Image (tube, rainbow, N blue to C red):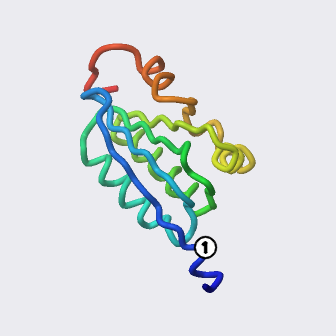
């Protein structure tokens, strides 16, 4: 097996609606230059669901490269433009470290679980959050 084949692990996605105003996208695997386009496409698809808030669960991510960070920055900017919220669930060192060492920590709202995100968002339904 070549080195290239060993590095190309699939990027897996799961979407759910924990509340009608929230779309949650869970991402698992390595987000690098090879998988960033698919990550971008899945985020775009999640935004089409028109929920007021996108919760992005990155806790199963095993590697986050600059290409993945770029997708996150773009997604956050789109959320602001569309008057929506984006909350990241980050519980793993590869994700938190990549965000912190690049100086991007202040651009994202990060929590450690869906429960913590729901606390931040409060109760009820707000189409314009």
In the foreground, 104 or 38: 38
Quarter of the image for the C terminus: give it.
Answer: top left
Residue ranking furthest to the bottom: 2
In the foreground, 123 or 13: 13
Who's the residue at 50% across and 53% down the image?
28
Who's the residue at 38% across and 38% down the image?
54
Residue ranking furthest to the front: 1
Question: Relative to residue 6, is residue 73 depicted above or below?
Answer: above
Question: Relative to residue 27, is residue 37 depicted above or below?
Answer: below
| 67 sits to left or right of 98 | left
Residue ranking furthest to the right: 101
Q: How many marks?
A: 1
| 121 sits to left or right of 60 | left
In the foreground, 112 or 46: 112
- Residue 102 image point, x, y percent: 71, 50
In the foreground, 13 or 38: 13
Quarter of the image for the N terminus: give it.
Answer: bottom right
- Residue 29 image point, x, y percent: 53, 57
Q: Residues within 10 Å of mark 1 (few under 14, many from 20)?
A: few
What residue did someone put label 1 on? 7
Who's the residue at 25% across and 26% down the image?
127
| 121 sits to left or right of 45 | right
Write down the quadrant of residue 53 in the picture. Answer: top left
- Residue 10 image point, x, y percent: 47, 66
Write down the quadrant of residue 108 in the picture. Answer: top right
Element at badge 1? helix
Question: Relative to residue 31, is residue 3 depicted above or below?
Answer: below
């Amino acid at each position: 097996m070549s080195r290239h084949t060993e590095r190309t692990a699939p990027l897996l996605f799961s979407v759910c609606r924990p509340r009608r105003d929230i779309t949650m996208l869970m991402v698992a695997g390595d987000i690098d230059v090879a998988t960033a386009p698919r990550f971008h496409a899945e985020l775009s698809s999640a935004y089409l669901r028109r929920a007021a808030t996108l919760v992005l669960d990155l806790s199963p991510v095993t590697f986050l490269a600059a290409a993945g960070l770029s997708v996150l920055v773009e997604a956050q900017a789109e959320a602001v433009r569309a008057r929506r919220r984006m909350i990241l669930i980050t519980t793993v060192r590869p994700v938190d470290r990549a965000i912190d060492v690049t100086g991007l920590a202040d651009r994202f709202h990060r929590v450690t679980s869906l429960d913590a995100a729901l606390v931040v968002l409060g109760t009820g339904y707000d189409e314009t959050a």
